[in-house]
Image (cartoon, rainbow, N blue to C red):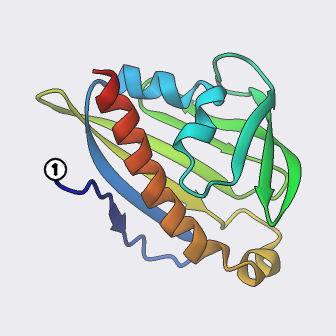
Amino acid sequence: MAEIRSEILQSGDPKVKSAQIEIEGSASEIFELLTDPTQHPLIDGSNSVKSVNWGPETLTLGSKFGMKMKIGIPYHITNYITEFDQNELIAWRHVGKWVWRYELTELGNGKVRVVESFDGRPSPYQWLLRRRNAFSYAEKAIAKSLVLLKKMVEQKA
């Protein structure tokens, strides 16, 4: 069996890291996973999302959800859904104001292109992102997240 890989994209901005992958399935079934916060630890390529502390069963625009995290030390964070277009787009941010975004495009023939992005531009904490090497870290993590997402969706089918 061939190794599953996502493709890292060049955004032209060092503060925006993106990757894409094609998944066999429908945008609605992929979006269902992305809008269920309890699934986020299972598709987290950074291995920093440990569990959901609280929030709705299904995320929509304006939803808040709390996550138990660990990057070096354990902590809790509240995320806010800031962008939402059913079966096409979901994005969230937390107090650091950097954004995690998923964009889905139906390609036909039962395939969907999923682009995941980490956008650090809105954050007032650029010094922290640089100090933690967050941009390089995020690029690798989203590439891994997309592979996990593909495996999860395609194994369900």
Which residue appears farthest toward the top when viewing the image? 57
Q: Secondary structure at mark 1?
A: loop
Left or right, residue 146 beside residue 82: left
- Residue at x-position 60% and y-position 50%: 100
Q: Position of residue 61 (x, y in %)?
A: 66, 26
Depicted 18 relative to depicted 109: above or below: below
Depicted 84 relative to depicted 101: above or below: above
Depicted 62 relative to depicted 44: above or below: above
Residue under label 1, please give it. Answer: 1
- Residue at x-position 74% and y-position 36%: 51
Q: Which sits in the foreground, 139 or 64?
A: 139
Badge 1: how crowded within 10 Å, few (<14), some, or many (20+)? few
Number of numbered callouts drawn: 1
Q: Amino acid at mark 1?
A: Met
Q: Report the quarter where the C terminus lies.
A: top left
Q: Position of residue 65 (x, y in %)?
A: 78, 31
Q: Which sits in the foreground, 41 or 9?
A: 41
Depicted 90 relative to depicted 14: above or below: above
- Residue at x-position 54% and y-position 79%: 14
Which residue appears farthest toward the front when viewing the image? 1
Q: Position of residue 78 (x, y in %)?
A: 84, 40
Left or right, residue 83 beside residue 70: left
- Residue at x-position 29% and y-position 58%: 5
Left or right, residue 125 beside residue 13: right
Image quarter for residue 59? top right
Image quarter for residue 47? bottom right
Q: Position of residue 113 (x, y in %)?
A: 29, 43
